[in-house]
Amino acid sequence: EDILREQLLENYMSLSTFRISVPIKSGKIAIDKCVYVDKKDYELEYESSASYEQAKKEFVEMVKEFGIQYKKGMPKIKRAYEALRNQI
């Protein structure tokens, strides 16, 4: 049985992420390019096998070396929904 039958399905938004990652220290660092609604943004993530505390310390030290100030970001799906809401 087709559960959608005559229901209308609309796509209000799409979110695409393009990622480049490289191994570094005890994990890998990733640069994400996120495209959604009429926006494009970037985020830097660090995935590590170390404890959360150790990984965060390594990450904060790394970004300092690159002259980047550490700032906890909003999840990309939340940024996308906010952009959609601001557009409507």
Image (cartoon, grey):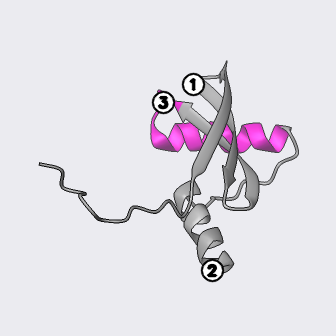
Residue 67, x across and y down, in percent: 88, 45
| In-image side of 68 versus 85 (left or right) | right
Q: Is mark 3 on a helix, strand or loop?
A: loop
Disc 3 residue type (three-letter): Ala
Residue 68 versus residue 10: which sits nearer the camera?
A: 10
Label 1 and label 3: CA atoms lie apart by 8 Å
Residue 77, x across and y down, in percent: 53, 58
Residue 50 is marked as: 3
Q: Are marks 1 and 3 in contact (CB under 8 Å)?
A: yes
What secondary structure characterizes most of the magenta part? helix
Magenta segment boundaries in residue numbering: 48-65
Q: What element carries label 2?
A: loop
Q: Say few, some or many: other residues with alpha carbon within 10 Å of mark 3 (under 14 / 14 to 19 / 20 or more).
A: few
Q: Is mark 1 on a helix, strand or loop?
A: strand
Residue located 84% across and 38% down the image: 65
| In-image side of 69 versus 9 (left or right) | right
| In-image side of 75 versus 42 (left or right) | left
Question: Toward which corner of the image does residue 64 lie, by quadrant?
Answer: top right
Q: Is residue 61 magenta?
A: yes
Q: Mark 1 points at which residue?
A: 27
